[in-house]
Image: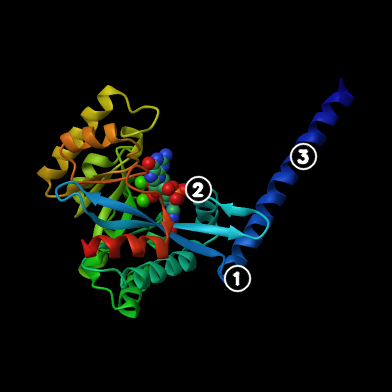
Amino acid sequence: AKRDGRATARFFETGMDACSQARRALEIDLRRALVLDQFELVYQPQMDLDSDRLVGCEALIRWHHPTRGTVSPAEFIPLAEEIGLIVPIGEWVLRTACREAARWPGDVTVAVNLSPAQFRSPALVGAVASALAAAGLAPGRLELEITEGLLLQESQANIDTLNALRALGPRIAMDDFGTGYASLSSLRAFPFDRIKIDRSFVSGPKAERDAMAVVRAIASLGATYGMTTIAEGVETPEQMRDIRSEGCTAVQGYHIGRPMPAAAIARLFADQADT
Ligand code: C2E
Ligand code: CA
Ligand code: CA
Ligand code: CA
């Protein structure tokens, strides 16, 4: 029995090593990804439900690695957060999204995700200002998405950062609304322009009959606070019809369009401008 125990312990340690080695290898690759130009932004269209027109999109990062293939942001953003790489990666995202959006017609907007470590970085406000200036993008065409988890503590520092960002001109959206604990109080404490209703209420496994009641409640809450609402994860015509009847302002999801490369979204916006 004693020998068995040792064998188990050794197996366990070996397992741990393999795991942390894999993590270290991922970290090394991630540190080189910016220099090697392995990141790409893809853009997912957003449709306004009043006009049925595309009014903007969300920028989503992709990491193309020569042997790993395309790594999901769900896999590397948390690691980038942990090791501090999110700040330079986030600056690259801001610069790239603003430069791309400056080529689009009219007043279509681009939304960029800000992760918590990036939000807390003292470099953030300057990075947003310089991305806008370098691209010559009207600040109102940039939207910054922040998750409610970030705002769990309604600290003065968080409020100051939000106000400083807002003073530059971008819109501020609360992402994944309804999934955290801070929802209601954060809406009162922070000046958001828009609420993004989490897709678990729209098309997730939990999106049953009463999930639409939640969508309706959030839409009317948004209206009360003077915020617009966008539902994410709209995958079918039925979901879109339901969302529309619940009073949401806009939709995003596979039914409207998948995330696509810069050239494709530019074409989509240009085609629409012609009609
Ligand atoms: P998110 O901000 O909630 O982004 C929405 C995610 O839902 C995206 O996954 C998108 O591709 C996916 N999605 C869109 N429509 C549908 C739909 O109809 N059905 C389903 N099932 N999924 C849909 P993605 O691109 O894998 O991004 C995952 C998360 O990674 C994002 O969640 C965001 O939190 C983070 N992320 C992505 N890009 C960036 C970035 O540039 N910076 C930071 N900080 N985080 C990012
Ligand atoms: Ca988002
Ligand atoms: Ca989201
Ligand atoms: Ca999400």
Q: Is mark 2 within 8 Å of ligand 1?
A: yes
Residue 27: horizontal and vertical position, in percent?
A: 63, 58
The nearer-to-camera label among 3 and 1 is: 1
N-term mark: 3 or 2: 3
**Mark 2 burial class by Cα count in 10 Å: few <14, some 14-19, many 20+:** few
**At label 1, which amino acid type do we have?**
Leu
Q: CA distance from mark 3 to mark 1?
A: 34 Å
Assign a secondary structure to mark 1.
loop
Q: Tell which circle, 3 or 1, labels the residue nearer the N-terminal end.
A: 3
206 versus 149 height, above or below: above
User: Which disc number belongs to residue 80?
Assistant: none
Q: Is residue 261 visible?
A: yes
Q: Decide if residue 88 is on the left or right side of residue 35.
A: left
Q: Secondary structure at mark 3?
A: helix
Residue of label 2: 74
- Residue at (40% x, 49% y) in the render: 258
Q: Which residue is mark 1?
A: 36
Residue 243 position in % (x across, y down): 22, 36
Instruction: Compare residues 57 and 77 and report the one nearer the observer.
Output: 57
- Circles 3 and 2: CB atoms closer than 8 Å: no
Residue 153 seen in this snapshot: no
Which residue was labeled with disc 3? 13
- Amino acid identity at mark 3: Glu
Considering depth in this image, is 60 or 23 the residue closer to the camera? 60
Q: Identify residue type, mark 2.
A: Ala
